[in-house]
Image (cartoon, grey):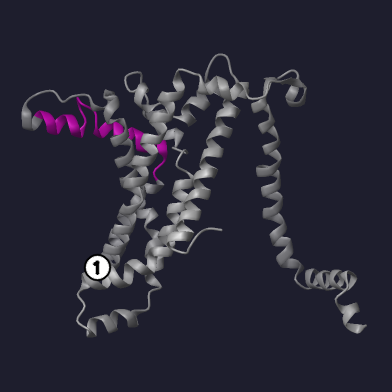
Amino acid sequence: MAGNRKDSPVAGKRDLKRQILARWQLYLLLLLPLIYIAVFAYVPMGGLVIAFKKYNVRQGIWGSEWVGLKNFEKFFKSVKFPVVMRNTLTISLYSLVVTFPIPIIFALHLNAMPGRRYKKVIQTVTYIPYFISTVVMVGLIFQVLDYRNGLWGSLFSLFTGKTAPNILANGKLFKHIYVWAAVWQTTGYSAIIYIAALAGVDQSLHEAAMIDGASRFQRLLYIDVPSIKPTASIMLILAVGNIMNVGYEKVLLMQNDLNLNYSEIVSTYTYKIGLASGITDFSLSTAIGMFNSVINFTLLIIANTLSKKLSGSGIF
């Protein structure tokens, strides 16, 4: 009987109440982020319904006419759809292939370097570009790659005696400029998590390997790389889950009429339809945003499932 009383729902509620009262400060701290997430993440999701409506500002969200999947069909049948998807996937995949492994390689080499002071200098120098604002970054790109007075134009004229080609107007080079500028800006900062993981490696493993005659490269390959493998797997899953989210600010600032056919991506197209164009279409822009999110979520699930099967680690 006593055991039944202890296991009853009433007793369970009393125990939970005691736990909350005993640790009320922790629950109060937990309450603040939960309120923030609810107000700024979940409540606005109700506005996604306008993707299925012909939204009218006067009629409001719930008073607007229901059109079903017509906004999605409008996007899929649009002349811009193949161009926008091609550019988004090309830039995203190119960026993933280049910017994901480089911070790992950088962290491994930095960890292998002798001299603590030298390491700190290298870390500081590589971290700084990450904190440069997007506007300033694009301004630097334009200044350096200017075919008349920039570093590119000056060096080309110096060695050839001719005027440099305008590579900023060459649409085919847009993705290369975007991705390699991102490498310069983010490599140092992205390497922090891998450097932290390498700092937790047991030094006795390296000592034992050195006694066995292992070279520095062998220790890097068989001790350092396996130690950051779980971290790299999780970072790769997150990167794949954001594969459709190309930073629109940088792309938008780098766009011009000459490279638009190669630089128009989903996010910039959505921005122009929803806000920048003369006739704003909130329903269509919401539908495009929802399509983008569904693709990202699907890729995230696939990447997480594959990671758990291949390496045994995942985010959920």
Q: Image point 79% across, 68% down: which residue?
A: 20
Circle 1 residue: 113
Q: Residue at x 38, y 62 (%)?
A: 194
The residue under label 1 is which amino acid type?
A: Met
The location of residue 72, given as percent across then percent down, is 58, 25
- Decide: is 155 above or below 63: below
**Can residue 116 be seen at all in this image of the molecule?**
no
Q: Is residue 142 magenta?
A: yes
Q: Is residue 22 above or below residue 141?
A: below
As drawn, which residue projects farthest toward the top? Answer: 278
Specify the principal SS of the magenta part.
helix
* On screen, residue 274 above or below 43: above
**Where is 21 relative to 51, above or below?**
below
Whether the magenta-drawn stretch holds residue 313 is answered as no
**Which of the image's four quarters has the N terminus?**
bottom right
Closer to the camera in the image, 7 or 99: 7
Q: Which residues are magenta?
A: 132-157
